[in-house]
Image (cartoon, rainbow, N blue to C red):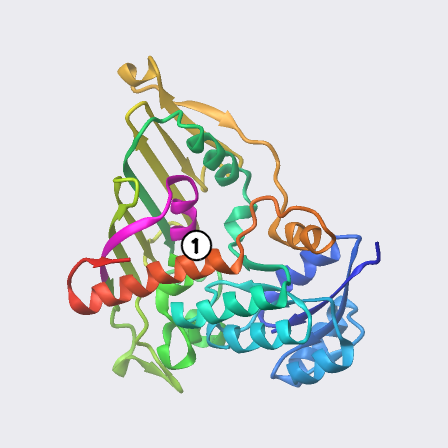
Amino acid sequence: MKKVRLAIIGTGGMANMHAQEFKKIAVCDIVAACDVNEARAGEFAAKYGIPAAYADAAKMLREVKPDAVTIVTPDASHAELSIMAFKAGAHVLCEKPLALNARDAHKMTLAARKAGKVNMVNFSYRNWPTIQAATRFVHTGALGEIRHVEAAYHQSWLVSTAWGVWHKEPGWLWRLSTAHGSQGTLGDIGVHIVDYATMPVGAIANVFCRLKTFHKTPGDRIGEYKLDANDTAILSVEFKNGAAGTVQMSRYTTGHQNRLVLEINGTKGALRMDSEVSTDTYEVCRGKDINTSTWRKVKCPATLTNYQRFIQAIRGGKPAGGADFARGEEIQRVLDASFASAKAGKVVVL
């Protein structure tokens, strides 16, 4: 079978990861790069040996006719670009969150179904063996009926320079500004931890959410960026299987550059994982170990990356744990309910 001809739309920071990962796949050729900033698109194309650079996505789709696109643009443009790509006959891998709201996400899901094309959301932590293996284990029923869940995503780039100086770089500033398409911490990293928690546990039935935006600069503005997006989100949730839990996320968790933690407690045992400890090992406490609170490590087998799953699916294989647009829409409904809950100050049923 011929190679998959791929175009990258959006050439900012995360696009570098997409280019690097797709270039590792022998049956994939990156044939074009596109960005509203023409100079940046050209520099990106030169950096990765991509033969064509464009500033207009519609023109790129018409002229290059790629088999597939990966969309690595700010959240607000995901819906328009994905639907445009489907109409042009391309398969689509889209960065998270899928859209700004469930209404747009649903339109994207319908467009994907109508086009009959492969569609995936880049929930990047599905690349870790831990969550894939843990999900399979929980689904065997080995933990019994799930009762209590704790999930958290910790970042610290608002108090650390490990990832850059946030108040001097547009790549960080737009994430703090709703006018620039950001849904704050809830939309940016909350989408990951909601996916992470619900993979093994199942869907969320209702949510009570509290959002917090902290004062950062005089007038909470830097140039064109009004710093009004949420910095911390705390969700109290009930899952459809009856389990209760908390899902929290913040950019102010000092000492943690990028940490995902999950603990699942059931009637027959518990499982926990911490990405700062390992991304290919989880721990289990069950059976006789419950009485002594003994935790045992479980090594997880390697898994495919989302990039590999995407190309594999296009070439006729089965996506090994990939998330389609319908899954992205499901997660977006949780985010929408969380925003509604925070605004109303009450529990919202999904």
Q: Dot 1: what SS?
A: helix
Q: Where, by quadrant of the figure, is residue 252 drawn?
A: bottom left
Could you tell whether 96 is left or right of 347 in the image?
A: right
298, above or below 56, in the image: above
Relative height, residue 310 to residue 13 (above, below): above
Reading the image, the residue beneath label 1 is 192
Query: Residue visible at 51% across and 60% down?
Result: 325
Q: Residue at x 38, y 45 (%)?
A: 197
Q: Locate the C terminus and report the quarter of the image it occupies.
A: bottom left
Q: Nearer the viewer, residue 329 or 186?
A: 329
Q: Point out residue 314 in the picture as x, y percentages from the top left corner.
A: 70, 56
Outermost right residue? 2
The answer to whether residue 118 shows anywhere in this view is: yes
Is residue 251 visible to us here? no
Inspect the image, locate mark 1, and give the three-letter code of the amino acid beneath it.
His
Percent x, y of residue 7: 70, 70
Q: Nearer the viewer, residue 165 or 78?
A: 78
Q: Which residues are magenta?
A: 193-210
